[in-house]
Amino acid sequence: MQPVPADEPLPGVWWLHGTRGSNVFLVTLPGGGVALVDTGFAESARAILAALEAIGRPLEGILLTHRHRDHTGAAAAIARATGAPVIAGAGDCRLRDGRPLLRSGVGRTHPVRLVAGLLGRRPEPVPVAIAVDCEMDVLPGMRAIPVPGHTPGSLCFIADHLAAAFVGDLVISHRGDLTRCLAWANHDDARYLQSIAEFADLAPPAGFPGHGEPLLTGFDVALRALAALPPPSPHPPHRPRTCCPPHAFRRSLRRPPVTDSGKEVVKQLRPTPNCPLPLRR
Ligand SMILES: [Zn+2]
Protein backbone atom coordinates (compact mmCIF):
# COMPACT_ATOMS: atom_id res chain seq x y z
CA MET A 1 0.00 0.00 0.00
CA GLN A 2 1.38 3.44 -0.85
CA PRO A 3 1.81 5.85 2.08
CA VAL A 4 -1.39 7.65 2.99
CA PRO A 5 -0.94 11.46 3.01
CA ALA A 6 -2.48 11.73 6.46
CA ASP A 7 -1.90 11.22 10.15
CA GLU A 8 -3.65 8.29 11.78
CA PRO A 9 -4.21 9.65 15.30
CA LEU A 10 -6.52 6.76 16.15
CA PRO A 11 -6.34 3.39 14.38
CA GLY A 12 -9.00 3.60 11.68
CA VAL A 13 -9.14 7.41 11.52
CA TRP A 14 -7.01 9.34 9.03
CA TRP A 15 -6.57 13.11 9.46
CA LEU A 16 -5.76 14.25 5.95
CA HIS A 17 -2.83 16.40 4.86
CA GLY A 18 -3.06 19.01 2.12
CA THR A 19 -6.66 20.07 2.69
CA ARG A 20 -7.74 23.64 3.38
CA GLY A 21 -10.50 25.12 5.48
CA SER A 22 -11.56 22.52 8.03
CA ASN A 23 -10.11 19.27 9.27
CA VAL A 24 -10.95 16.39 6.93
CA PHE A 25 -11.13 12.81 8.16
CA LEU A 26 -11.45 9.38 6.57
CA VAL A 27 -12.96 6.82 8.92
CA THR A 28 -12.89 3.06 8.45
CA LEU A 29 -16.24 1.34 8.68
CA PRO A 30 -16.92 -2.16 10.02
CA GLY A 31 -17.69 -3.43 6.50
CA GLY A 32 -14.24 -2.46 5.16
CA GLY A 33 -15.15 0.79 3.41
CA VAL A 34 -14.47 4.32 4.58
CA ALA A 35 -16.54 7.42 5.30
CA LEU A 36 -15.34 10.93 4.59
CA VAL A 37 -16.13 13.51 7.27
CA ASP A 38 -16.19 17.04 5.82
CA THR A 39 -14.21 18.09 2.77
CA GLY A 40 -12.59 21.47 3.40
CA PHE A 41 -12.62 24.14 0.68
CA ALA A 42 -13.02 23.15 -2.99
CA GLU A 43 -9.25 22.99 -3.55
CA SER A 44 -9.05 20.09 -1.04
CA ALA A 45 -10.54 17.64 -3.56
CA ARG A 46 -7.17 16.55 -4.93
CA ALA A 47 -5.76 15.71 -1.51
CA ILE A 48 -8.90 13.76 -0.60
CA LEU A 49 -8.83 11.72 -3.80
CA ALA A 50 -5.11 11.01 -3.31
CA ALA A 51 -5.76 9.77 0.22
CA LEU A 52 -8.62 7.57 -0.96
CA GLU A 53 -6.42 6.05 -3.63
CA ALA A 54 -3.65 5.36 -1.14
CA ILE A 55 -6.02 3.75 1.34
CA GLY A 56 -7.59 1.66 -1.42
CA ARG A 57 -10.98 1.19 0.24
CA PRO A 58 -14.35 2.19 -1.24
CA LEU A 59 -15.84 5.50 -0.12
CA GLU A 60 -19.28 4.66 1.25
CA GLY A 61 -20.47 8.14 2.17
CA ILE A 62 -19.59 11.83 2.41
CA LEU A 63 -20.70 13.05 5.84
CA LEU A 64 -21.06 16.81 6.22
CA THR A 65 -21.18 18.26 9.72
CA HIS A 66 -22.73 21.51 8.44
CA ARG A 67 -23.12 23.59 5.33
CA HIS A 68 -20.31 26.14 5.73
CA ARG A 69 -18.04 26.20 2.73
CA ASP A 70 -14.83 25.60 4.69
CA HIS A 71 -16.35 22.16 5.50
CA THR A 72 -18.22 21.35 2.26
CA GLY A 73 -16.41 23.09 -0.61
CA ALA A 74 -15.12 19.87 -2.21
CA ALA A 75 -18.24 17.77 -1.59
CA ALA A 76 -19.66 18.08 -5.11
CA ALA A 77 -16.34 17.14 -6.73
CA ILE A 78 -15.78 14.14 -4.45
CA ALA A 79 -19.34 12.91 -4.94
CA ARG A 80 -18.97 13.18 -8.69
CA ALA A 81 -15.59 11.43 -8.72
CA THR A 82 -16.58 8.56 -6.43
CA GLY A 83 -20.35 8.23 -6.70
CA ALA A 84 -20.56 8.24 -2.90
CA PRO A 85 -23.79 9.58 -1.36
CA VAL A 86 -23.74 12.88 0.51
CA ILE A 87 -25.26 12.93 3.98
CA ALA A 88 -26.11 16.26 5.63
CA GLY A 89 -28.57 17.83 8.05
CA ALA A 90 -32.04 18.51 6.67
CA GLY A 91 -31.92 22.01 8.17
CA ASP A 92 -28.94 22.84 5.95
CA CYS A 93 -30.74 21.71 2.78
CA ARG A 94 -33.31 23.20 0.45
CA LEU A 95 -35.56 21.31 -1.91
CA ARG A 96 -35.31 21.52 -5.69
CA ASP A 97 -37.79 19.42 -7.65
CA GLY A 98 -38.50 17.57 -4.43
CA ARG A 99 -34.86 16.59 -3.90
CA PRO A 100 -32.60 18.01 -1.17
CA LEU A 101 -29.65 20.17 -2.16
CA LEU A 102 -27.12 21.52 0.31
CA ARG A 103 -27.62 25.22 1.01
CA SER A 104 -24.43 27.12 0.33
CA GLY A 105 -23.07 29.02 3.31
CA VAL A 106 -19.92 30.95 4.10
CA GLY A 107 -20.33 31.22 7.86
CA ARG A 108 -20.00 34.33 9.96
CA THR A 109 -16.73 33.64 11.73
CA HIS A 110 -15.21 36.85 10.44
CA PRO A 111 -16.55 39.72 8.29
CA VAL A 112 -13.63 39.32 5.88
CA ARG A 113 -14.54 35.69 5.33
CA LEU A 114 -18.17 36.64 4.85
CA VAL A 115 -17.34 39.24 2.21
CA ALA A 116 -14.83 36.95 0.46
CA GLY A 117 -17.43 34.19 0.38
CA LEU A 118 -20.15 36.41 -0.98
CA LEU A 119 -17.91 37.86 -3.68
CA GLY A 120 -16.33 34.50 -4.60
CA ARG A 121 -17.45 31.96 -7.12
CA ARG A 122 -20.81 30.34 -6.41
CA PRO A 123 -20.20 26.75 -5.34
CA GLU A 124 -21.47 23.81 -7.33
CA PRO A 125 -24.84 22.54 -5.99
CA VAL A 126 -24.44 19.44 -3.84
CA PRO A 127 -27.25 16.85 -4.12
CA VAL A 128 -27.90 15.27 -0.73
CA ALA A 129 -28.84 11.58 -0.63
CA ILE A 130 -29.82 11.49 3.06
CA ALA A 131 -31.11 14.67 4.72
CA VAL A 132 -30.95 13.92 8.43
CA ASP A 133 -33.60 15.37 10.73
CA CYS A 134 -33.33 12.98 13.71
CA GLU A 135 -30.77 10.66 15.27
CA MET A 136 -30.21 7.80 12.83
CA ASP A 137 -27.70 5.30 11.48
CA VAL A 138 -26.47 6.75 8.21
CA LEU A 139 -23.80 4.17 7.33
CA PRO A 140 -22.81 0.86 8.93
CA GLY A 141 -21.15 1.90 12.19
CA MET A 142 -21.94 5.61 11.77
CA ARG A 143 -24.68 7.44 13.67
CA ALA A 144 -25.76 11.00 12.91
CA ILE A 145 -26.98 13.21 15.76
CA PRO A 146 -28.56 16.60 15.01
CA VAL A 147 -26.91 19.45 16.97
CA PRO A 148 -28.65 22.55 15.60
CA GLY A 149 -27.45 26.02 16.50
CA HIS A 150 -24.20 26.76 14.67
CA THR A 151 -26.31 26.15 11.57
CA PRO A 152 -29.90 24.83 11.54
CA GLY A 153 -28.79 21.46 10.18
CA SER A 154 -25.53 20.90 12.08
CA LEU A 155 -24.73 17.23 12.76
CA CYS A 156 -22.29 15.24 14.85
CA PHE A 157 -21.34 11.72 13.81
CA ILE A 158 -20.47 8.93 16.24
CA ALA A 159 -18.46 5.89 15.13
CA ASP A 160 -19.44 3.45 17.86
CA HIS A 161 -16.91 0.82 16.74
CA LEU A 162 -14.10 3.36 17.33
CA ALA A 163 -15.65 5.15 20.33
CA ALA A 164 -15.06 8.39 18.43
CA ALA A 165 -17.17 11.43 17.54
CA PHE A 166 -16.76 13.84 14.62
CA VAL A 167 -18.26 17.11 15.73
CA GLY A 168 -17.59 19.80 13.11
CA ASP A 169 -17.97 23.24 14.69
CA LEU A 170 -19.89 22.11 17.79
CA VAL A 171 -16.64 22.89 19.61
CA ILE A 172 -13.19 24.05 18.62
CA SER A 173 -10.11 22.33 19.96
CA HIS A 174 -7.33 24.59 21.09
CA ARG A 175 -4.19 22.86 22.33
CA GLY A 176 -6.13 20.12 24.06
CA ASP A 177 -8.78 22.48 25.41
CA LEU A 178 -12.31 22.73 24.04
CA THR A 179 -13.89 26.11 23.37
CA ARG A 180 -17.23 27.30 22.04
CA CYS A 181 -17.81 29.10 18.77
CA LEU A 182 -18.35 32.83 19.06
CA ALA A 183 -22.00 33.69 19.68
CA TRP A 184 -22.27 35.83 16.58
CA ALA A 185 -20.86 33.04 14.42
CA ASN A 186 -23.87 30.90 15.31
CA HIS A 187 -27.22 30.87 13.58
CA ASP A 188 -29.00 30.41 16.95
CA ASP A 189 -26.68 30.71 19.93
CA ALA A 190 -29.17 29.56 22.59
CA ARG A 191 -29.91 26.40 20.59
CA TYR A 192 -26.18 25.93 20.03
CA LEU A 193 -25.52 25.96 23.80
CA GLN A 194 -28.37 23.49 24.30
CA SER A 195 -26.89 21.21 21.62
CA ILE A 196 -23.52 21.18 23.43
CA ALA A 197 -25.26 20.14 26.63
CA GLU A 198 -27.31 17.45 24.89
CA PHE A 199 -24.38 16.01 22.96
CA ALA A 200 -22.20 16.00 26.09
CA ASP A 201 -24.41 13.18 27.42
CA LEU A 202 -23.68 11.03 24.34
CA ALA A 203 -20.06 11.89 23.64
CA PRO A 204 -17.47 9.07 23.47
CA PRO A 205 -13.91 9.44 24.83
CA ALA A 206 -12.34 10.49 21.48
CA GLY A 207 -13.47 13.65 19.71
CA PHE A 208 -12.50 15.06 16.32
CA PRO A 209 -13.51 18.73 15.93
CA GLY A 210 -13.56 20.50 12.59
CA HIS A 211 -10.80 22.89 13.67
CA GLY A 212 -7.83 22.25 15.94
CA GLU A 213 -6.37 18.98 17.11
CA PRO A 214 -8.35 15.83 17.94
CA LEU A 215 -8.77 14.85 21.59
CA LEU A 216 -8.06 11.14 21.72
CA THR A 217 -9.03 10.72 25.37
CA GLY A 218 -11.19 12.74 27.71
CA PHE A 219 -13.26 14.41 25.00
CA ASP A 220 -16.46 13.38 26.81
CA VAL A 221 -15.22 14.82 30.11
CA ALA A 222 -14.04 18.06 28.48
CA LEU A 223 -17.35 18.48 26.66
CA ARG A 224 -19.36 17.98 29.85
CA ALA A 225 -17.17 20.57 31.59
CA LEU A 226 -17.75 23.02 28.73
CA ALA A 227 -21.49 22.37 28.86
CA ALA A 228 -21.51 23.08 32.59
CA LEU A 229 -19.98 26.55 32.18
CA PRO A 230 -22.43 29.42 32.56
CA PRO A 231 -23.64 31.15 29.41
CA PRO A 232 -21.08 33.66 28.25
CA SER A 233 -21.24 37.21 29.49
CA PRO A 234 -21.38 39.89 26.80
CA HIS A 235 -18.59 41.68 28.74
CA PRO A 236 -16.21 38.97 30.00
CA PRO A 237 -13.69 40.11 32.60
CA HIS A 238 -10.82 38.46 30.72
CA ARG A 239 -10.19 37.15 27.26
CA PRO A 240 -9.16 33.53 27.48
CA ARG A 241 -9.69 32.61 23.84
CA THR A 242 -8.46 33.45 20.44
CA CYS A 243 -10.25 35.05 17.55
CA CYS A 244 -9.68 35.44 13.86
CA PRO A 245 -8.40 38.94 13.12
CA PRO A 246 -7.94 39.91 9.48
CA HIS A 247 -4.21 39.18 9.33
CA ALA A 248 -4.75 35.68 10.73
CA PHE A 249 -7.49 35.12 8.19
CA ARG A 250 -5.21 36.15 5.34
CA ARG A 251 -2.61 33.73 6.65
CA SER A 252 -5.21 30.95 6.79
CA LEU A 253 -6.02 31.46 3.10
CA ARG A 254 -2.39 30.75 2.30
CA ARG A 255 -1.98 27.98 4.84
CA PRO A 256 0.36 25.28 3.54
CA PRO A 257 -0.67 21.64 3.75
CA VAL A 258 -0.97 20.33 7.29
CA THR A 259 2.23 18.61 8.36
CA ASP A 260 2.60 15.33 10.17
CA SER A 261 2.04 17.01 13.50
CA GLY A 262 -0.81 19.23 12.39
CA LYS A 263 1.08 22.20 13.87
CA GLU A 264 -0.21 24.71 11.31
CA VAL A 265 -3.77 24.13 12.43
CA VAL A 266 -2.84 24.75 16.01
CA LYS A 267 -0.77 27.84 15.19
CA GLN A 268 -3.74 29.29 13.37
CA LEU A 269 -5.85 29.01 16.50
CA ARG A 270 -3.31 30.40 18.99
CA PRO A 271 -4.33 33.47 20.97
CA THR A 272 -3.38 36.67 19.24
CA PRO A 273 -1.93 39.51 21.32
CA ASN A 274 -4.04 42.65 21.39
CA CYS A 275 -7.03 40.81 20.00
CA PRO A 276 -9.81 43.40 19.88
CA LEU A 277 -12.63 40.92 20.11
CA PRO A 278 -13.90 39.42 23.37
CA LEU A 279 -13.93 35.66 23.31
CA ARG A 280 -15.63 33.24 25.54
CA ARG A 281 -15.46 29.71 26.76
ZN1 LIG B 1 -18.98 26.55 10.63
Image (cartoon, rainbow, N blue to C red):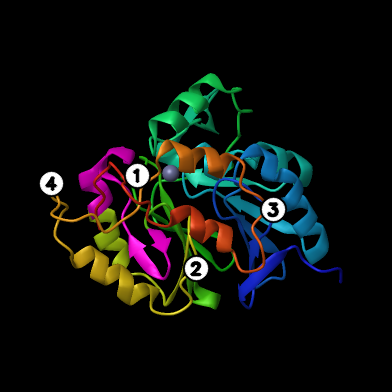
* Residue kind at label 4, given as amino acid type: His
* Residue kind at label 3, given as amino acid type: Gly
Q: Which residues are magenta?
A: 172-193
- Answer with mark 3 or mark 1, whichever residue precedes in sequence: 3
Q: Among all residues in the image, which is located at the extreme top? A: 119
| Real-space Cα separation, disc 3 to disc 1, in angstroms | 26 Å
Q: Nearer the viewer, residue 265 or 66?
A: 265
**Rendered position, 99 above or below 146:** above
Does the closest atom of ligand 1 sit within 8 Å of the Cβ of label 2? no
- Answer with mark 1 or mark 4, whichever residue precedes in sequence: 1
- Answer with mark 4 or mark 3, whichever residue precedes in sequence: 3
Q: Nearer the viewer, residue 175 or 117?
A: 175
| Real-space Cα separation, disc 1 to disc 4, in angstroms | 21 Å
In the picture, measured across the screen, residue 234 lies left or right of residue 73, that is left
In the picture, measured across the screen, residue 102 lies left or right of residue 81, that is left
Closest to the camera, between mark 2 and mark 4, is 4
Pointer 4 residue: 235
**Rendered position, 27 above or below 235:** below
Q: Secondary structure at mark 2?
A: loop
Q: Among all residues in the image, which is located at the extreme right? A: 1
Pointer 2 residue: 214
Quadrant of picture, ligand 1? top left
Residue at figure coordinates x 34%, y 51% from the top left:
273
